[in-house]
Amino acid sequence: MSTSMSERRHLVKTAMKAPYLTREEELELAIQWRDNKDEKALEKLSLSHMRLVIAVASRFKNFGLNIGDLIQEGHVGLLEAAARFEPEREVRFSTYATWWIRASIQDYILRNWSIVRGGTSSSQKALFFNLRRLRAKLSSNQTPLTDSELHQKIADAIGVKQSDVAVMNARLSGPDTSLNAPVTDTEGSSADRQDFLVSDAPQPDEIVTENIDAERRNTWLASALDVLSERELKIVRERRLSEDGATLESLGKKLGISKERVRQIESRALQKLKSALLANQPDKSVYAISM
């Protein structure tokens, strides 16, 4: 639930009044929470670091989300940091907590910035959160860059593909649009945006035609295979009609003959198949197996 303006002001005011902690105080509170689950210790530790949460959240205010919600998510990250903090490492809690606060806020932005989920990999997240900054920095150079050159420089800086930069740049350039949004043409008639999407799938008549042709080819091939001997049929099936395609050497070992003999039998069998197919369907032989 989004925080109201008054709640946000109260939160900020309370955070600003909270006293700073020394390193020793941080460690003592962290140990009390870890070892004894002291709620008061956790409250004091988290409240003293709400300034940090607000500061981190303010860096992401340009993504169009409620700053109060960002602060709330940052507080979630702060509590996660408190649960995972190891005082023995002698690291300041603020240094450790900053990563968790930022990660929690970034995850919230990625979940809510768009109805289309994006930025699931680390490189895509880096692209999402750094694209605008890098684009502004590169665009400020005296030498003007084309879109392609700009995208390539950003891709090199972040370590992603140029096409990924182009896609993300397009996403950040405009809001989401519903596929059910109406579109009005020049004649005044309207339709949904989804009505203009082009499908790459084959048309129904093409699917039916392909299925009929496939059945015919299978029938022709099954009839032609009857002319082969048992050994010829085995070699053709394992060499030409299976997905993996057995090697000449493996078939030779299985049949107890040399791989050269397997090649000869296969060649003879294919010629017999070709003759049988041409005899029955002289204009359709191209549909048979590769010779």
Image (cartoon, rainbow, N blue to C red):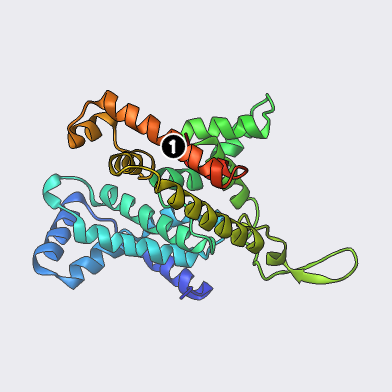
Q: Is mark 1 on a helix, strand or loop?
A: helix
Identify which residue, 257 or 50, lies in the foreground.
Answer: 257
Tell me which corner region of the image, top left, top right, bottom left or bottom right, holds residue 270.
top left
Image x and y of residue 214, in percent: 53, 54
Res. 131 in view: no
Identify which residue, 73 or 205, lies in the foreground.
Answer: 205
* Residue at x 35% of width, y 56% of height: 101
Res. 75 in view: yes
Image x and y of residue 289, in percent: 47, 41
Against 288, is 37 above or below? below
Is 189 placed left or right of 238 in the picture? right
Amino acid marked by disc 1: Lys
Image x and y of residue 53, in percent: 38, 58
Against 274, is 46 above or below? below
Image x and y of residue 226, in percent: 39, 49
* Residue at x 33% of width, y 31% of height: 265
Q: Quickly name the residue at label 1.
A: 272
Q: Which residue lies furthest to the left in this view?
A: 35
Is 15 placed left or right of 83 in the picture? right
Label count reads: 1
Tell me which corner region of the image, top left, top right, bottom left or bottom right, holds residue 44.
bottom left
Give the crowd class for mark 1: few <14, some 14-19, many >=20 residues within 10 Å.
some
